[in-house]
Amino acid sequence: MYKVLLVDDEDIEREAMAEIIPWKALGMELADMAWNGIEGLEKIKTHLPDIVITDIKMPVMDGIELIRKTHELYPGIFFVVLSGYGEYEYTSKAMELEIRHYILKPCDVDKIVEVLLNVKNELMSREEKLKSEREYQSSIQRMVPHIKERILHELMTKKELSVSDKFLLANFTEDLEGDFILLSVRGQKEFDQLDRFALTNILKELVGEDQVYMSAGLKKEMVYLLPGAFSASLPALMTKAHKEYYKYKKVRLCSAVSKRGAVKECFQLYCQIQELFYFQELEENREFLRYEMYEDESESSFLMVNYARIRNAKSQEELMFEIYSSFVKMEIRQIPPERMAKVFGFALKILFGEEERNLDLEKNEAWELLKEVIERCSFHMNLAFPDTKDGRRMKEILFMIYRNIKNPDLNLQYMAQNVLYMNEDYLGRFFARNMNERFSAFLVRIRLSLALRLLESQPDIKVSELAEVTGYPVDGQYFTKVFKKHTGMVLSEYRRSVKGKGEEGVE
């Protein structure tokens, strides 16, 4: 039943309409009556009617003012205006207020019923529309967690987001500021739906529901995207979470938190978590894992592989450089080939989902290991040179450059005569045609790029050692001259800048 309020200053007409209109047959009830706008407004506040039938010209407060004030307070109320001949000025003002239903005085019952039926139909249509919108919004709200879970899963596995998902991600994160962390919680067995629900509720109670931006379930693992500000407080919070979950399931959990980063870096952040869980398998059980625990331990060899840079390589030459950089970092730390094999095997698991296995080593030949890793990554990333005579030759040339890069005598002539056994001029032309760069320029570029990469990870490395691994005389004098010429900075100045960046990143 729709409630109706009748407002008219003429008692006879007001009482007549109250009697002659078949309210019940119309599916309506007359909630009350008022004789002017002020009284009408008070009764509107009391009854909250669906429809107000009001005279347009009344003392104290006319119908126009009643409509205006009611719209400010209750914009959903429908108005039917009663107007007489000659009240065109009032009627035009009512039209400006978007009033569409009018009854001309003296009132005819059939006309009143016709107008009220039209109003009723509009009310019903509006209710259907609102119901549909509510159902749609409810459906969207139910879908949002699943959409977020899918997007987070794709971000962690480095799948390219579709245009629509990029739009949704921007919408989900538009009000978020600062950086983020990934928190992963692992159980001893695969989580079922109820386990995931319970674990997520426990976490939301501890950090606040609005602080868990996204979550994704991965068999034995639940991953959450949280504000970076929680990084320091998570150990204590997760201790409580583990205890609460143990009360519910009698199962012990292990949690790991990534370093801080941007949403678009979720793949790198998740790789960090995978590393941490791998560390966990190498030693005694810990309930909470973070990088600070391992930075000074032997397991830090795993941190020497930059997964993001490998994954972002756009050519096989770029890929070779990134893998070789990781290889040299481990060589400087005197990590044995067997250990390197374990590190690179884990990298292939993280990057491409390969089953972890020992990489082949021939008589502790580390170069063969490096070559195998490059080949596998090239295959997975579709970056291999064309399987043509020129493609195979170019790949072999690059392999041999990296294999001989530490040799101070390495140049185009040495490469042609002592390594590849081919004509020097032909090699120079072939290299420039395929790499769009002269051999000498390429060699200087990768040697200096390698030096910069090593300084990033080990700012205090000795000049002699840096010169030696990049193919310059060990006294370091020539290396420092070349370094300044191509970077515009002396080596000590660059060291300070690298250390400064590192200190800024400390939380």
Image: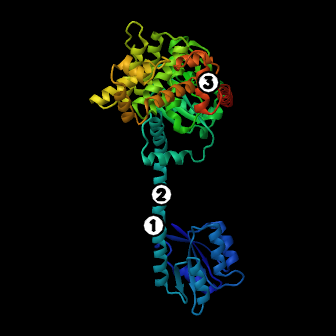
Mark earlier in primary sequence (3, 2): 2
Near mark 1 (Cα within 10 A), the count class, few <14, some 14-19 or many ≥20, is few
Can you tell which quarter of the image residue 228 is in? Answer: top right
- In the image, 226 versus 210, the foreground residue is 226
- Label 1 secondary element: helix
> Picture coordinates of residue 388 (x, y %)?
27, 30
For the view shown, which residue lies furthest in the right direction?
60
Q: Nearer the viewer, residue 315 or 242?
A: 315
Q: Which residue is mark 2?
A: 133
Among the two numbered marks 3 and 1 on one chain, the one whose residue lies closer to the N terminus: 1
Q: Looking at the image, is 345 positioned above or below residue 307?
A: above
x, y (%) of residue 240? 63, 24
Q: CA distance from mark 3 to mark 2?
A: 69 Å
Q: Position of residue 324 (x, y in %)?
A: 47, 22
Tell me the SS state at disc 3: helix
Mark 2 or 1 closer to N-term? 1
- As drawn, the label of residue 480 is 3
For residue 339, above or below residue 306 = above
Instruction: Calculate the distance from the C-alpha at mark 2 to the C-alpha at mark 1.
Output: 12 Å
Q: Is residue 455 left or right of residue 23?
A: right
Q: Secondary structure at mark 2?
A: helix
Q: Residue 239 occupies which quadrant of the picture?
A: top right
Q: Measuring 42% from the left and 29% from the top, which residue is drawn there?
A: 317
The quadrant the C terminus occupies is top right
Residue 198 seen in this snapshot: no
Image-based side of 79 in relation to 163, left or right: right
Q: Are marks 2 and 1 in contact (CB under 8 Å)?
A: no
How many numbered callouts? 3
